[in-house]
Image (tube, rainbow, N blue to C red):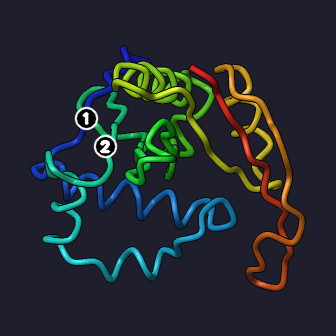
């Protein structure tokens, strides 16, 4: 595989973002709270707004040979008592590109970016109990499980627990 390039997505990336996120939601529906149907209903303007410089979150993309194959979004808490925290959401790597370092490159780039923000002391994320490979990736990148919420999500007749992880900066 060619070198992985990770960069912040911009509104111009909205079509590629739509395709990559929709593919992730379809490939691993149990890994996400948003459904493919809900995401597909979003208009181009809404997606471009998510990627704008003034958006609430920063979405990073992992590219190989110009193709967007992985996503990770960082959202800093805005309430003053919580502003030291950054939440990690929507991490995905295209099924055909897994096991080749894209996930690690995304997580490491996200951690580096969040650590550059003044006052950030920790990163937080949640991972469904069905996503063992994702949990192992986060742990390899320094996150640790600090708790598990049983009966966190019910979808398609299945009950999922959710592991909560933290990385202290």
Residue receiving disc 1:
8
Q: Which mark is residue 48?
A: none
Rounded to the nearest angstrom, the CA distance separating label 1 from label 2 is 7 Å
Q: Residue at x 28, y 78 (%)?
A: 42
Residue with the most extreme front position:
81
**Residue 22 appears left or right of 49:** right
> Where residue 109 sits in the image (x, y, percent)?
42, 22
Q: Residue at x 48, y 36 (%)?
A: 84
Mark 2 is surrounded, within 10 Å at the Cα level, by few (under 14), some (14 to 19) or many (20 or more) other residues, namely many
> Where residue 100 sits in the image (x, y, percent)?
56, 23
Please determine whether, in this image, residue 18 is positioned above or below residue 117. below
Residue receiving disc 2:
58
The residue lying toward the viewer, choosing from 98 and 50, is 50
Residue with the most extreme left position:
12
Instruction: Please say if the residues under marks 1 and 2 sit with CB atoms less than 8 Å apart.
Output: yes
**Residue 19 appears left or right of 168:** left
Name the mark nearer the viewer: 1 or 2.
Answer: 2
- First-in-chain label (1 vs 2): 1
User: Disc 1 on helix, strand or loop?
Assistant: strand
Q: Residue at x 17, y 48 (%)?
A: 13
Q: How many marks?
A: 2
Q: Quadrant of residue 19?
A: bottom left
> Where residue 35 sits in the image (x, y, percent)?
53, 75
Q: Quadrant of residue 98?
A: top right
Mark 1 is surrounded, within 10 Å at the Cα level, by few (under 14), some (14 to 19) or many (20 or more) other residues, namely some
> Where residue 97 sits in the image (x, y, percent)?
51, 35
**Residue 140 appears left or right of 146:** left
Q: Residue at x 37, y 16 (%)?
A: 2
Question: Which image quarter is the N terminus in?
Answer: top left
User: Disc 2 on helix, strand or loop?
Assistant: strand
Residue with the most extreme top position:
3
The residue lying toward the viewer, choosing from 47 and 149, is 149
């Amino acid at each position: 595989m060619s070198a992985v390039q990770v960069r912040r997505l911009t509104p111009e990336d909205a079509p590629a973002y739509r395709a990559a996120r929709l593919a992730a939601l379809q490939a691993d529906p149990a890994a996400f709270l948003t459904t493919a149907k809900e995401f597909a209903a979003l208009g181009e303007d809404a997606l471009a707004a998510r990627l704008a410089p003034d958006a609430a979150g920063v979405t990073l993309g992992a590219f190989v040979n110009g193709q967007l194959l992985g996503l990770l979004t960082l959202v800093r808490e805005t309430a003053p008592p919580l502003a030291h925290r950054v939440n990690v959401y929507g991490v995905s790597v295209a099924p055909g590109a897994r096991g080749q370092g894209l996930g690690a490159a995304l997580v490491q780039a996200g951690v580096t970016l969040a650590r550059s923000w003044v006052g950030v002391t920790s990163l937080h994320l949640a991972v469904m109990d069905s996503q063992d490979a994702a949990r192992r990736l986060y742990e390899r990148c320094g996150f640790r499980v600090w708790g598990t919420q049983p009966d966190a999500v019910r979808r398609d007749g299945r009950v999922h627990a959710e592991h909560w992880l933290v990385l202290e900066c």
